[in-house]
Amino acid sequence: MNYKKLVPCFVLAFFALAAQAQVAVIVNPKSAAASMTADQVASIFLGKSATLPSGATAMPADQAEGSAVREHFYAKVAGKQAAQVKAAWSRLVFSGKATPPKELSSSAEVKKFVAANPDAIGYIEKSAVDGSVKAVLTVD
């Protein structure tokens, strides 16, 4: 086996993983929440809780299914893969216990939705956070 040809592949894979962007969980700037734990956020996005720390009913906004930021968010915040999240929501919807987060097409759409709704919560690339939203949790 020619190991000299394999080394560049491993180096490239390492840098691709290292370059993965940080994800910021965002809320409306008027929200009373200053910070949230990963467990609090996961509870909202997995349908286990319907409220923000302030007690307000949360309006969660998800990224598009299959997007890299969504995969990264659920892996880091909830410790789940896309298929696990989809299965969990299928059970909740079938039983009538919860409604899944509103799915939006991009980080720009999530940011716009959160900026327009005082009880909204979403996640975007940390580099996209600006004054229109407030970051309450950042994950690598």
Image (cartoon, rainbow, N blue to C red):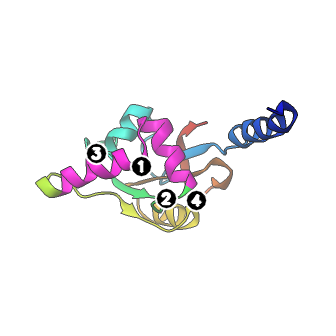
Which quadrant, please, contains the C terminus?
A: top right
Residue 6 is situated, as x and y percent measured from the top left of the image, at: 80, 36
| Relative depth, front residue between 15 and 100 | 15
Task: Identify the mark at residue 82; answer none if there is no mark.
Answer: 1
Q: Mark 2 points at which residue?
A: 66
Amino acid type, callout 4:
Ser
72 on left or right of 65: right
Residue 95 is situated, as x and y percent measured from the top left of the image, at: 12, 53
Q: Evaluate if marks 3 and 4 touch, with contact meaning CB atoms under 8 Å apart.
A: no
CA–CA distance in space, label 1 to label 3: 23 Å
18 on left or right of 79: right
Task: Identify the mark at residue 132; answer none if there is no mark.
Answer: 4
CA–CA distance in space, label 2 to label 4: 26 Å
Q: Evaluate if marks 2 and 1 touch, with contact meaning CB atoms under 8 Å apart.
A: yes
Q: Which residue corresponds to the image point at 63% horizontal and 42% vertical from the top-left?
A: 22
| Of marks 2 and 4, the one in the foreground | 2
Q: Name the residue under label 3.
A: 51
CA–CA distance in space, label 1 to label 4: 29 Å
| Relative depth, front residue between 113 and 62 | 62
CA–CA distance in space, label 2 to label 3: 26 Å
Sequence-wise, the earlier of marks 1 and 4 is 1
